[in-house]
Image (cartoon, rainbow, N blue to C red):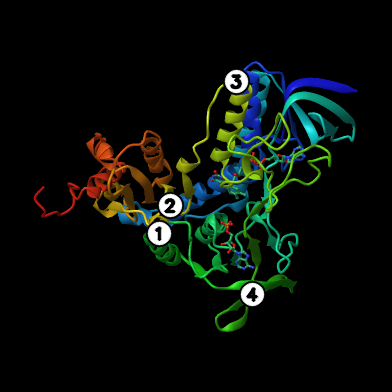
Amino acid sequence: MSEQYDVVVIGAGPAGYAAAIRCAQLGFSTACIEKDKGNDGEPTLGGTCLNWGCIPSKALLDASHKYIEAKEHFADIGITASNVEVDVPKMIARKDEVVKGLTGGITGLFKGNGVTALYGTGKLLANKQVSFTDHDGKETTLEAEHVILAPGSVPVAIPPAPLTEDFIVDSTGALEFSEVPKRLGVIGAGVIGLELGSVWNRLGSEVVVLEALEEFLPMVDERISRDAKKILTNQGLDIRLGTRVTGAEVKDGAVEVSYQDSEGEQTLQVDKLIVAVGRRPFTEGLLAPDCGVNLDERGFLYVNDLCQTDAPNIYAVGDVVRGPMLAHKSSEEGVMVAERIAGFKPLVNYDTIPNVIYTHPEIAWVGKTEQQLKADGDNYKVGSFPFAANGRALAANDTQGSVKVIADADSDRILGVHVMGPQASEIVAQAVIAMEFDASAEDLGLIMFAHPTLSEAVHEAALGVAGHAIHMINRKKK
Ligand code: FAD
Ligand code: AMP
């Protein structure tokens, strides 16, 4: 039996569902295949991001932040909150409700826009055919004019720390603890390790983060990375750099972790261990040998800037292709491909992808860091402004961090903006817009920002590039 579609999409994460919805909106008959089932055992759309990534982690980060605010910081602003307690099962259940609402939303968007959801596994065959096997094992061949591959990524497993149910878990397991572990180990001080470590640290775990690299957050602006390490350490994260985990074993109801640091072999006892050492593209069972799509040397599906694979009319988008593994990058690629299939000419601007780490304070940036510009030998100017001098941050009792604007020394064009502070994830959007329009630091300085807002720190940092932020002392007469 075979079915015919204009477009078949494999994978319904942010890359695949956005591509499928846009294809349907553009008038193509579109099917989207998704294999995953949710925590309730029912088929679910939305991929890692909605089910086991961005959304559930932010639900727990927001909840745990509110808890720590109530417990430790309400008193600073004249509110007495006694007996503040955590109900972990309720917090997890609420997280699941948020996930259910959003994944159900994608089901609704598919129905409303006319995307056919096919629940099961897809495999790309030769000649733009796709084999679809449903959850009962029934196989159908789909004929398509265009195929979009969006199978996403999965957590990297490391041989020294094999997952064992309940004790050694990956990021997915770390979103499901039924109680606060007393002692928690995290392997990897990357974005996911720090976010999940922060959640459980705020809820009461003693958290040790083991990171093989000597440098903390090497992709982040050096000053921010230094400040962030101090702030997170003060919050209670015991971040041990230059420590390579060599083994982990469950013994007597706990995990014994072995690692090496500059002083030799060490051991650490924890109640749970989260392995957060990165993610890898997921291509298992995806490609028939004669389908014409190739992998690159790191196992990603090989594509050009337009997300075209080596096979005609076959595209790949999202975490499974080169570039940062981020939901917004994934969905922009999905939409670009859909619109290109329709004959439009959009591009993804890979130079203006915002990055966010949802610790508190949040860390967000776009464009180049000073260390990258130095390494490239580029001339640049810098303006920065601390939230400690921002009225809104002071009013909100949330003053850690700063904004840094980096501009080209000659043209004044903005090359990068780095924010650590309250709502950095929202603030960085202004920088992305400015950079998309090729703004100069002077342009940003000439724009009016509402007072009092956190965004005024962006304004002041932009003015600071030319040396004349208003709420800073500057004795140069110009
Ligand atoms: P996925 O979301 O992985 O979706 C791929 C889908 O394809 C999956 O549902 C999979 O089941 C399905 N699939 C695979 N193969 C097949 C097949 N053969 N047949 C049928 N279906 C198939 N990113 C952010 O931008 N912001 C964040 O705050 C953020 N937080 C994160 C927190 C955590 C804990 C994690 C793990 C990730 C986070 N990410 C975040 C990353 C984000 O989740 C990914 O970048 C994003 O989900 C990638 O989208 P995708 O569509 O490419 O892949
Ligand atoms: P990310 O890829 O940003 O999620 O970060 C994962 C982090 O895990 C990287 O900084 C790696 O250096 C770190 N890492 C990988 N393997 C190990 C290991 N065996 N022990 C400690 N850290 C590790």
Q: Mark 3 points at which residue?
A: 343
Q: Name the residue under label 4.
A: 269
Q: Mark 2 points at which residue?
A: 363
**Ligand number 1: quarter of image:** top right
Indicate the position of residue 235 as horizontal and vertical percent values.
44, 63
Image quadrant of residue 223?
bottom left
Secondary element under disc 2, as helix, strand or loop, is strand
Q: What amino acid is at disc 4?
A: Gln
Specify the quadrant that holds the N terminus.
top right
Q: Is mark 2 within 8 Å of ligand 1?
A: no
Q: What amino acid is at disc 1?
A: Gln
| Side of 29 relative to 411 (left or right) | right
User: Which of pointers 2 and 4 indicates the residue nearer the eye?
Assistant: 2
Which residue is most to the top? Answer: 27
Number of the label disc, if any, that sits on residue 62: none
In the rendered structure, which disc, 1 or 2, sits on the residue that comes first in sequence?
Answer: 2
In the rendered structure, which disc, 4 or 1, sits on the residue that comes first in sequence?
Answer: 4
Cα separation between marks 2 and 3: 38 Å
Q: What amino acid is at disc 2?
A: Ile
Q: Which residue is drawn at 63% across and 29% down?
A: 19
- Pick the front one: 45 or 278: 278
The crowd level at tag 1 (other Cα within 10 Å; few <14, some 14-19, many 20+) is some
Image quadrant of residue 434?
top left
Secondary element under disc 3, as helix, strand or loop, is loop
Cα separation between marks 1 and 2: 17 Å
User: Which of pointers 3 and 4 indicates the residue nearer the eye?
Assistant: 3
Secondary element under disc 4, as helix, strand or loop, is strand
In the rendered structure, which disc, 2 or 4, sits on the residue that comes first in sequence?
Answer: 4
In the rendered structure, which disc, 3 or 4, sits on the residue that comes first in sequence?
Answer: 4
**Pointer 4 with pointer 1, Cβ within 8 A:** no
In the rendered structure, which disc, 3 or 1, sits on the residue that comes first in sequence?
Answer: 3
Q: Can residue 82 be seen from the camera position used here? A: no
